Image (spheres, coloured by chain):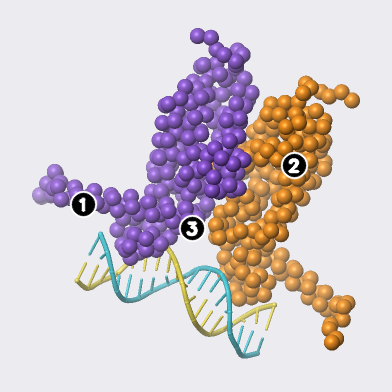
Chain colours: A purple, B orange, C yellow, D cyan
DNA sequence: GTCTATACTCCGATAGAC
DNA sequence: GTCTATCGGAGTATAGAC
């Protein structure tokens, strides 16, 4: 039997591109709706209204509301991971990279509150992210583990810091600062207010938690 | 003009009591609904169903859904404050009292997640607590300030610790631990899992943030 | 203080014409 | 891939009988 030619016609190329643009536009609008009405306030109907189509048309792009949540979750994870990775790449490996990476995480999350809440606060009980959408967060732990390993190798931290336990402990610093900032200063960006400026001070406590064998002050070349 | 007798008849006493019981029952049910369906999932209709009445009957006790949220907010604040106060009263004044108080806070919040989220995570954008319901949280800050002042007086911490700034900084510790525990280990009580057991270790860092002038080890009588 | 009845708005999702 | 029409359900809140 003959099927379609294996090389798709330019027409379907353009169609596929247009389709992808519409998908991205739906996600942009959904993100805006969540920002204004709360993560739980996202509704297909409101997205359709803003897109200028009737609600059933949305189903040509996403099979359900939960599928939109999942796509938003994935998009958030990918962007968040990228911002962390970039900040860490432009820093000195070790504690500095970890601090800069977590600061970038905080900055990104405050700038994308709705996605951040969807990803890390889970305010929609009926939504569970798919395995595929969850995958980047595993990579995020790996990144932080690597930075901790660098810090241990450089003598900034003791060997106990090269552990998942340390990742979790340090993650409570950033989570605490962000939770307080979001709840009490919902309009301030990273670096302003009573909470986020304390983060560097908190990170300076890490060597006290995992003291290196040799003095911390300066390491010799 | 004559009005009703100033001493109410026993009948209306009983009626008032019965009414109060119904109000408490509505709040109990509402709390359970929030626990099961999410804070945002609370609905008058579901409360009525579980109470075994028709939705309009609820309006004899609360003028609106938001009024129920507000009553729950107040109830949570009062209970939470009481648990903190009790733990602090049974501890050595100063850092110990602060730590025990915050641990009690964490315990209470994990045992009453729905109320805790309503109170400190604010997942219902359209709900703003009334001033009256918010009042206990001001008292909570005062309690913590007093414990910090005790710690400074006892030489456990430096004078900078007697400040609202220190209260906010320390609050990020408990907020971080709780946020992570609730998001990642939603079924574990305080003291189990990867996050809440780290809290005492975190509190031991506070003297490093506000170092006392005299050595910390032991204070002379 | 309970009910019925009702008004109103909103939602997710599907069927089928074009 | 868009639409109309519709199903079936949810919700808050009010009016008024009993």
> Mark 1 or mark 2: which is in front?
2
**Dot 1: chain letter:** A
SS for dot 1: helix
**Dot 3: chain letter:** A
Farthest residue to the front: give it. A192
| Residue at (58% x, 22% y) in the render | A160
Q: Residues within 10 Å of mark 2 (few under 14, many from 20)?
A: many
Cα distance between the residues tagged 2 and 3? 34 Å
| Residue at (31% x, 55% y) in the render | A61
Q: Is residue B61 above or below residue A197?
A: below
Percent position (x, y) of residue A20? 28, 49
Labelled disc at residue B144? 2
Cα distance between the residues tagged 1 and 2? 62 Å
- B43 left or right, relative to A81: right
Percent position (x, y) of residue A208? 64, 23
- Of residues B4 and B118, the one drawn nearer to the viewer in this rendering: B4
Q: Residues within 10 Å of mark 1 (few under 14, many from 20)?
A: few
Give the quadrant of the C terminus of chain B.
top right
Percent position (x, y) of residue A15? 21, 52
Which sits earlier in the primary sequence, circle 3 or circle 1? Answer: 1
Q: Is residue C16 above or below residue B109?
A: below
Q: Label 1 belongs to which residue?
A: A15
- A216 left or right, relative to A15: right
Q: Label 3 belongs to which residue?
A: A37
Give the quadrant of the N terminus of chain B.
bottom right
> Mark 3 or mark 1: which is in front?
3
| Residue at (64% x, 64% y) in the render | B68
- B150 left or right, relative to A166: right
Q: Quadrant of residue A211?
A: top right
């Amino acid at each position: 039997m003959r099927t379609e030619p294996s090389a798709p016609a330019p027409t379907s190329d353009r169609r596929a591109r247009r389709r992808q643009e519409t998908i991205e536009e739906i996600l942009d609008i959904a993100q805006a709706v969540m920002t204004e009405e709360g993560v739980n306030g996202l509704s297909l109907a409101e997205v359709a209204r803003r897109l200028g189509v009737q609600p059933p048309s949305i189903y040509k792009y996403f099979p359900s509301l939960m599928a939109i949540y999942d796509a938003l979750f994935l998009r958030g994870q990918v962007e968040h991971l990228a911002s962390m990775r970039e900040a860490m790449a432009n820093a000195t490996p070790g504690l500095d990279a970890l601090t800069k990476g977590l600061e970038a995480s905080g900055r990104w999350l405050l700038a994308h509150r709705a996605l951040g809440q969807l990803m890390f606060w889970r305010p929609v009980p009926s939504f569970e992210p798919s395995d595929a959408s969850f995958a980047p967060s595993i990579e995020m732990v790996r990144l932080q583990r690597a930075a901790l390993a660098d810090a241990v190798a450089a003598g900034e931290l003791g060997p106990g810091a090269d552990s998942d336990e340390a990742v979790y402990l340090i993650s409570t610093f950033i989570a605490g600062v962000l939770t307080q900032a979001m709840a009490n200063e919902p309009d301030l960006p990273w670096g302003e207010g009573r909470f986020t400026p304390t983060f560097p001070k908190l990170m300076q406590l890490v060597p006290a938690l995992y003291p290196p064998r040799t003095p911390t002050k300066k390491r010799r070349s």
